[in-house]
C-alpha cells in the first residue's frame, strides 16, 4: 500500500539521508524544478553574454 499523505511517507523514511534531512517525493520534485530553473537562468545569461560579444 502506498501512503498518500506526507506524514505517512515521513514515518517510513529514515531521519537523515546523505547528510541532510529526509524529504517527501513532492519536496524532492520541488527542489529538482528549482534547481533546473537556476540552471536555465545561468544558461540564458551565458547565451546573452555570448551574443553581446559577437556583435
Image (cartoon, helix red, strand yellow):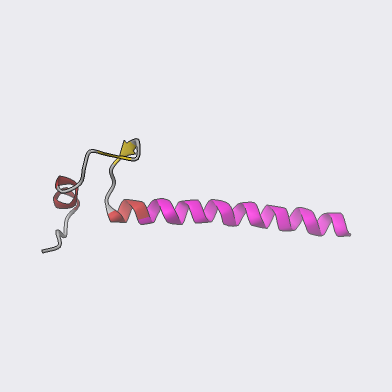
53 left or right, relative to 13: right
- Residue located farthest toward the front when viewing the structure as drawn: 18
- Residue located farthest toward the bottom when viewing the structure as drawn: 1
Residue 36 placement (x, y as % from top left): 51, 56
Residue 48 counted in the magenta span: yes
6 left or right, relative to 51: left
Name the quadrant containing residue 17.
Answer: top left
Q: Which residues are magenta?
A: 29-55
The structure residue drawn at horizontal position 38% and vertical position 54%, both measured from the top left corner, is 30
Q: Main secondary structure of the magenta part?
A: helix
| Quarter of the image where the N terminus is located | bottom left
Residue 9 counted in the magenta span: no
| Quarter of the image where the C terminus is located | bottom right
The image shows residue 24, relative to residue 55, as above or below, that is above
The image shows residue 21, relative to residue 10, as above or below, that is above
The structure residue drawn at horizontal position 71% and vertical position 53%, both measured from the top left corner, is 46
- Residue located farthest toward the top when viewing the structure as drawn: 19
The image shows residue 5, relative to residue 10, as above or below, that is below
Q: What number of labels is visible? A: 0
Residue 11 placement (x, y as % from top left): 14, 46
8 left or right, relative to 39: left
The structure residue drawn at horizontal position 43% and vertical position 54%, both measured from the top left corner, is 32
Residue 44 placement (x, y as % from top left): 66, 57
15 left or right, relative to 53: left
Amino acid at each position: 500500500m502506498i501512503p498518500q499523505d506526507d506524514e505517512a511517507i515521513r514515518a517510513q523514511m529514515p531521519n537523515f539521508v546523505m547528510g541532510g534531512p529526509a524529504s517527501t517525493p513532492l519536496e524532492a520534485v520541488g527542489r529538482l524544478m528549482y534547481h533546473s530553473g537556476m540552471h536555465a537562468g545561468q544558461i540564458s545569461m551565458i547565451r546573452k553574454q555570448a551574443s553581446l560579444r559577437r556583435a
